[in-house]
């Protein structure tokens, strides 16, 4: 969800207001995707490298994360409409206690929901996730372990399903260490030349239509 700071600069507003606009855009995108039949959405909210940003920016992001999670409880309209289960994944031990409490409340409030799923990746990178899965695979075995793709997948933060579409806004052509393990030979990568707060229902709808068209074409080969 890239381009919040650029959006703020272009519109002459504070960085905090830019991220808030991004959070509002997120609700619309989630609702549209779920209405179109998407079952699982994973969001790159905060990478491990983001801890290297100026402290005031990190504090803004953490406060926004805490507030957004605080609103996404069992009575949230989006959660109720889609019977939504929220999972927060990553190196959560690196977060402050107030953020951890908000994460725990939201995850506990939605853990029994069996509808759509949102994975929120915080203090996360794909390489760190892979390293974690290797350590966990070895630690769970009392005998010399054969590491396979299946055994690693079972120990990833994400688990399954594999990644069908990766969308990145702001026109930047790089993966930024997101879901490296989950990408596969048929993953569609969509780079959108607009800032995240400007990204809307029509934009994600066109991406889903393109993916559907490509999937049909592959099935006909």
Image: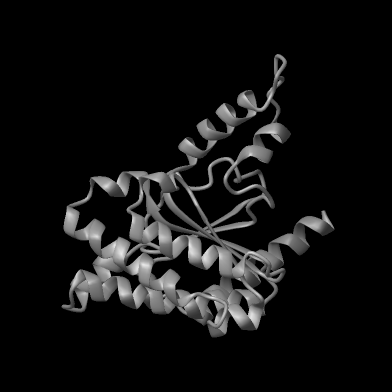
Say if 119 sits above or below 132 in the image: below
Q: Write the residue at 63% across / 68% down.
A: 210
Q: Nearer the viewer, residue 217 or 19?
A: 19
Give the left or right position of residue 24, taking residue 155 as reference: left
Residue 168 shows in this picture = no
Number of callouts: 0
Residue 205 drawn at (x, y percent): 58, 76
Q: Position of residue 207 (x, y in %)?
A: 57, 69
Q: Residue at x 46, y 36 (%)?
A: 128
- 110 left or right, relative to 143: left
Front-lying residue, 172 or 126: 126
- How was this image coloured? one colour
**Front one among 198 and 206:** 198
* Residue 220 or residue 18, whichever sits in front: 18
Please report the residue visible at 65 percent of the width from the left and 47 percent of the height from the top. Answer: 159
Residue at horizontal 39 percent and vertical 66 percent from the top: 193
Residue 17 figure quarter: bottom left
Q: Position of residue 106 (x, y in %)?
A: 51, 67
What residue occupies the far right of the structure in this picture?
Answer: 220
User: Looking at the picture, how far across and down is residue 25, in whole percent?
Assistant: 42, 77
């Amino acid at each position: 969800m890239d381009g919040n700071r650029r959006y703020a600069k272009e519109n002459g507003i504070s960085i905090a207001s830019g991220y808030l606009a991004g959070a509002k855009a997120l609700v619309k995108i989630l609702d549209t995707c779920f209405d179109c039949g998407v079952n699982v959405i994973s969001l790159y909210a905060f990478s491990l490298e983001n801890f290297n940003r100026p402290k005031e920016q990190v504090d803004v992001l953490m406060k926004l994360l805490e507030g957004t999670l605080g609103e996404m409880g069992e009575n949230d309209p989006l959660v109720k409409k889609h019977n939504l289960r929220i999972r927060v994944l990553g190196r959560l031990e690196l977060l402050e206690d107030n953020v951890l409490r908000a994460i725990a409340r939201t995850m506990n409030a939605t853990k029994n929901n069996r509808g759509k799923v949102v994975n929120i990746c915080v203090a996360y990178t794909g390489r760190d996730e892979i390293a974690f899965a290797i350590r966990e695979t070895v630690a769970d075995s009392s005998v010399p372990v054969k590491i396979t793709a299946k055994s690693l997948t079972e120990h990833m933060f994400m688990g399954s399903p594999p990644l069908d579409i990766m969308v990145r806004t702001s026109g930047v052509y790089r993966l930024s260490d997101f879901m490296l393990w989950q990408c596969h030979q048929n993953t569609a990568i969509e780079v959108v030349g607009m800032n995240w707060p400007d990204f809307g229902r029509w934009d994600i709808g066109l991406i889903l239509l393109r993916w559907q068209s490509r999937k049909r074409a592959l099935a006909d080969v």
